[in-house]
Amino acid sequence: MLTLGIIITISTLLLIKWLEKQKTPFIKTILDWFPAILFAYVMPAAVCYISGIDLSQIELHRWSRDFIMPLAILTVMSALSFRQLRVIGIRPIVLFFLGSFAVAVAPVALIWLAKIFLPEWYHLVISQDYWKGLIPIVGSWIGGSTSQLVLKEVVDCPDQLFITMLVMDNVLVNIWTLLMFQFIKKSDLWNKWFKIDDKVPDFIPDQVDLSSGHRKSLINTGLICLLILFLSYFFVPNFLVKILLLSAIGLLLGNVISTWDHAFVLKIGGYLIIMIMAILGLRLNFESFHLPASIVLFAVVWIIIHFIVMLAGAIIMKLHFAWIAIGSMANVGGISTAPAVTAAYNEEWMPYAVILAILSMVSGTTWGLFTIWLMGLLTGM
């Protein structure tokens, strides 16, 4: 099974890179609506679904978490320069936190509206403790699995309710990821529609310099990345600490070492992100897309509110619409999907997606506690 998973992952990577190079009008039209990197997510899932093979528990998923994702974070972050950070500024971070605020506040606002207009539904949600199932979702969307589990214990969410919400969370995030791939591809059109002129210059060349004079710096860059990866594997077991540390080290490497090959690490980071998406695709279960309508409707309205708040924020700040998708995926998606969605627009922006996803990881529990506090104000508990 492991060998099959590796074959599917590598085959997906090769297919994606081949699709990205195609110039035929038909393929380009398809890729305008269905970005090449999105194939990396859907194709492995389709192969598993059609063949009836379950690859959701193979060792490859651990390899992705322990090696591929940390290396992707290190390479992507080392492609970022302080000059780029100054050009981007604080606005994308403000937009990101607006998205986090919406995720934390929207469920309480919806329950408050139900208290006024649908009192029977409100009393059912409160008396049966259904609201407790919403709190772990706040942690999951903003912070990830760790925040989700912590908040489950804080509110003492019943196991069966937690599992139901977990399935809904997984389904909705998968669908939202597909939609954000579409949205970011069309962000330039949205910019024109709203008369937003917020262009970010490219700092890194698209092609890697393979000339003999440049080969030494390329090799040194690769060896340093591998050395740091293996040191982090043996000495930094905690995943969150590892991601934070590798991000900081990558940022320093790219700005301190004058011979650092930024084009090379960005290219490698792009390959690794595709592999991560393909491995995630091995876990995508099409059969789980069946849930009670009321739960789905509540969650859909919830995430739409999150999107509308970010949309309004981008319009007010005259911020490039691509940041809506990037900030939303950093909130709702996480450290693996946020850079992938970003790569569908511009690989050079992936480090910013990583930074926002890290902010999401470290703030998820706090936002969940904020939601609990708001629920206490609403219900008097």
Image (spheres, rainbow, N blue to C red):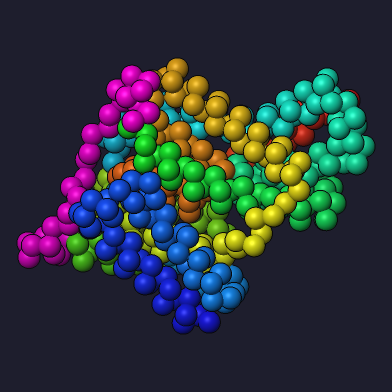
The answer to if 198 sits in the magenta stretch is yes
Q: Give residue 297's position: percent from left, percent from top.
A: 70, 39
Who's the residue at 51% across and 62% down the image?
A: 280
Q: Looking at this rendering, what residue extends furthest in the front direction?
A: 26
In the picture, residue 274 is in which quadrant?
bottom left
In the picture, residue 151 is in which quadrant?
top right
Closest to the observer: 223 or 100?
100
Please give the count of numbered marks on the rendered protein: 0
Who's the residue at 37% across and 51% down the image?
A: 35
- Numbered range of the magenta stretch: 189-217
Judge left or right: residue 210 versus residue 91: left
Res. 355 in view: no
Who's the residue at 56% across and 51% down the image?
A: 174
Who's the residue at 7% across and 65% down the image?
A: 212
Closest to the observer: 182 or 5?
182
Judge left or right: residue 188 versus residue 297: left
In the picture, residue 370 is in which quadrant?
top right
Q: Give residue 364's position: percent from left, percent from top.
A: 63, 41
The answer to if 262 sits in the magenta stretch is no
- Relative vertical location of residue 184 with respect to residue 279 in this rendering, above or below: above
- Quarter of the picture containing the C terminus is top right
Judge left or right: residue 225 versus residue 133: left
Q: Give residue 282's position: percent from left, percent from top.
A: 52, 67
- Relative vertical location of residue 78 with respect to residue 284 in this rendering, above or below: above
Judge left or right: residue 212 versus residue 239: left
Q: Looking at this rendering, what residue extends furthest in the right direction?
A: 127
Q: Give residue 207's position: percent from left, percent from top.
A: 17, 54
Report the predominant secondary structure element of the magenta stretch: loop
Res. 274 in view: yes
